[in-house]
């Protein structure tokens, strides 16, 4: 079935990663997947959470935000309400977990890398784009530390990227836009390393339950899409000193 944007069910949206777009951050990129655009920065600091003080171990954490006109109607800034939504907290914890899965925290030493993912424009897959772009910003920050001899060895053990898949109108589809996601019978977000190891699988039936074989098929479809994203990441990081 051809989708509204002309893609086949197993096709990614056009993906572009522009690295080094922020002059102040130790790492940064803009990731564009279809009409979804996320600005990612990685900031290095010398302070670590209290439970890591004197452990010779670092930390990686993340924050996520939808900018006011990233959606079709204005989204109120959470700073105005005085609290983050449950959705925001859940997504930024997911981003942090996903990135830490490929980081040697001892190699970082007593420092923390904070990855900020700000959605400039949302059309589905903002959390998966944030993870995929967040890794690029994190890699740039690690290169900054290595270039200044602040770390002795490369802190990243693998690449990490994420993608959405789902069942829409009875058909399995890769990389859902908002219009597709909003009417999906099954919605799944997949986070994985280049080694093929899984970091997180978030799967939900929005209506009728789905089967274990369908789950496996969706994961396999997502893995095929992730292989393409890993190549796009590699191209974006070409020339980065490790």
Image (cartoon, rainbow, N blue to C red):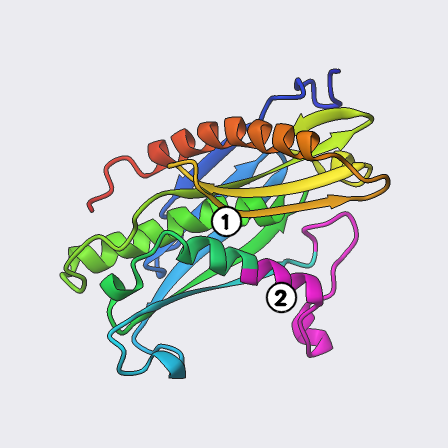
Residue 116 x/y as whole percent: 48, 60
Kindly identify the residue that appears in the image at 33 percent across and 44 percent down.
Answer: 158
Outermost residue, right side: 207
Residue 118: image quadrant is bottom right
- Vertical order, 137 against 229 (above or below): below
Secondary structure type for disc 1: helix
Pick whichever of labels 2 and 1 is earlier in the sequence.
2
The front one of 59 and 36 is 59
User: Does the magenta-highlighted stretch encompass residue 77?
Assistant: yes
Residue 66 x/y as whole percent: 64, 57
Kindly identify the residue that appears in the image at 47 percent across and 53 percent down.
Answer: 98
Residue behind mark 1: 131
Outermost residue, front side: 212
Alpha carbons under labels 2 and 1: distance apart: 14 Å
The front one of 81 and 199 is 199
Residue interval drawn in magenta: 69-93
Crowding around mark 1 (Cα neighbors within 10 Å: few <14, some 14 to 19, many 20+) is: many
Kindly identify the residue that appears in the image at 73 percent across and 16 percent down.
Answer: 2
Residue 235: image quadrant is top left
Residue behind mark 2: 89
């Amino acid at each position: 079935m051809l989708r509204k944007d002309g893609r086949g069910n197993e096709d990614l949206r056009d993906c572009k990663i522009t690295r080094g777009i922020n002059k102040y951050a130790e790492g940064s990129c803009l990731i564009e997947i279809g009409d979804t655009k996320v600005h990612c920065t990685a900031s290095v600091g010398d302070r670590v959470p209290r439970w890591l003080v004197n452990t010779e171990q670092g930390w990686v954490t993340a924050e996520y935000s939808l900018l006011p006109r990233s959606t079709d109607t204005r989204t109120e800034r959470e700073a105005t309400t005085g609290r983050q939504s449950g959705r925001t907290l859940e997504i930024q914890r997911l981003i942090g977990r996903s990135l830490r899965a490929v980081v040697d925290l001892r190699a970082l030493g007593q420092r923390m890398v904070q990855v900020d993912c700000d959605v400039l424009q949302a059309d589905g897959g903002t959390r998966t784009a944030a993870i995929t772009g967040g890794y690029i910003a994190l890699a740039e920050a690690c290169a900054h530390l290595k270039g200044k001899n602040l770390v002795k060895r490369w802190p990243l053990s693998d690449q990490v990227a994420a993608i959405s898949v789902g069942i829409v109108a009875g058909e399995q589809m890769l990389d859902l836009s908002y219009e597709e996601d909003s009417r999906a019978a099954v919605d799944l977000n997949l986070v994985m390393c280049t080694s093929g190891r899984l970091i997180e699988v978030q799967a939900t039936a929005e209506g009728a339950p789905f089967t274990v074989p369908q789950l496996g098929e969706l994961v396999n479809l997502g893995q095929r899409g992730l292989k393409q994203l890993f190549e796009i990441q590699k191209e974006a990081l070409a020339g980065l000193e490790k």
